[in-house]
Image (spheres, grey):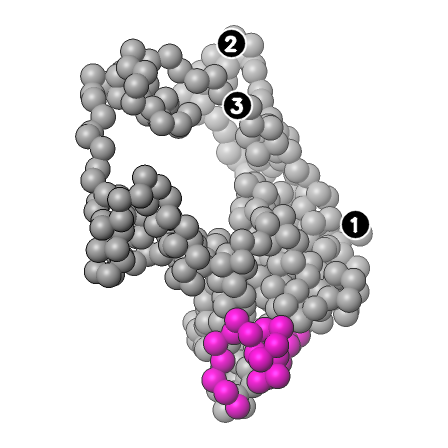
Amino acid sequence: MPPPDSQLALNSYEKKLLKKWIEQGAKFDKHWAFIPPKKAELPTTERTDWAQNEIDAFIMEKLEENDLAPSEKAGKHTLIRRMALDLTGLPPNADQVQRYLSNSSADILEQAIDEFLASPTYGERMTQVWLDVARYADSHGYQDDSYRSMWPWRDWVIHAFNNNMPYDEFLRVQLAGDLMPNASKEQILATGFNRNHPITQEGGVIQEEYQSYYVVDRTNTLGKGILGLTLECAKCHDHKYDQLSQRDYYEIYSFFNNVDEKGLRMDAVQAANQKYFADAPFMTITDEETQGVLSFINKDEGKDVKVMVMNDSMPRTTYIFNRGEYDSPGRK
């Protein structure tokens, strides 16, 4: 890296930087995502009566370094408003504020937190960040950007937060819910996470090319969204100091490469005319499901809705693509 025929060379500053690094011992640490976190020692501060928890100690340290003093503690009214906005995304209503302020209980703020956490709007607020990580949208992207019905998966995420689903289970069912023994409809719906990628509806595209794009998207999202690691640098070739090789990349890619999907199912006009709002594989949600195991889905009565999910029903041989090009397969 880079290949000789690129005619690229280091400039004088880069050469000096490398020389300095070598003179300093050429220390090279692992990528931060591979280093287990260690609990830091609490700093010693001049003022010891302000901190209410360990995080406060670090805040106090920085305040003192900058000759600053902490603000006075906010009143109950302000704290209740902040809690409501943080936990639900909405300000508290007048009745809630009046009820809290008229309560002389010593743990009224704790009671308010419990009430906000139990609110359905808590899940809606917390879900916003995960939807961004999961690249959620109810349209396919690309130039046509046609409608698609992914919102039942969004409703599942809200449901998971409101039911305080453990994080390991939350990840497991989204990545591989369809592979669970006797997978439930809820577990299958959770795998919509893997189908949130852009999908083309432009006629004339090359099927294999876009099918590979979809698998690449799922692979990269696993890295950036869950592992804290950008995997796509290894898609085209090895990098001397990267933790992952190109082979590692395509081994991860292979986990997402068995879906019975096509690069193009139909173009945007055909999809609109046929109301084809979910590219196969998909699951169909009826009134029966929303009255039972999928009762958290806000579906119009009498109207079935389809949502894209995973279904590993087409085993494929995965190759290492030379330079990351779909039409240049190398080793298996």
User: Is residue 89 shown to the viewer in this render?
Assistant: yes
For residue 283: magenta?
yes
Q: Identify the main secondary structure in magenta.
A: loop
User: Could you tell me the amino acid type at mark 3?
Assistant: Lys
Q: Counting other residues with Cα less than 10 Å from the Cα at mark 1, is it few (<14), some (14-19), or many (20 or more)?
A: few
Write the start and end of the magenta stretch as one range.
280-302
Query: Vertical placement of 205 versus 88: above or below?
Result: below
Depth order, front residue of 303/147: 303
| Residue in the picture at 20% in, 22% down | 69
State the mark number for residue 5: none
Q: Counting other residues with Cα less than 10 Å from the Cα at mark 2, is it few (<14), some (14-19), or many (20 or more)?
A: few
State the mark number for residue 39: 3
Q: Earlier in the sequence, mark 3 or mark 1?
A: 3
The residue identified by callout 1 is 331
Question: Would you say 172 lies left or right of 315 here?
Answer: left
Depth order, front residue of 46/93: 93
Expressed as whole percent of the image width and height from the top left, the position of residue 284 reads: 62, 80
User: Could you tell me the amino acid type at mark 1?
Assistant: Arg
Expressed as whole percent of the image width and height from the top left, the position of residue 177 reads: 68, 61
Q: Give residue 328's quadrant in the image.
A: bottom right
| Residue in the picture at 34% in, 50% down | 112
User: Could you tell me the amino acid type at mark 2?
Assistant: Gln
Which of discs 1 and 2 lies nearer the camera? The answer is 2
Expressed as whole percent of the image width and height from the top left, the position of residue 98 reads: 21, 55
Q: How far apart are the alpha carbons under marks 1 and 2?
A: 40 Å
Assess whether mark 2 and mark 3 are in contact (beta carbons under 8 angstroms): no
The residue identified by callout 2 is 24
Q: Report helix, strand or loop for mark 1.
A: loop
Expressed as whole percent of the image width and height from the top left, the position of residue 21 reads: 50, 14
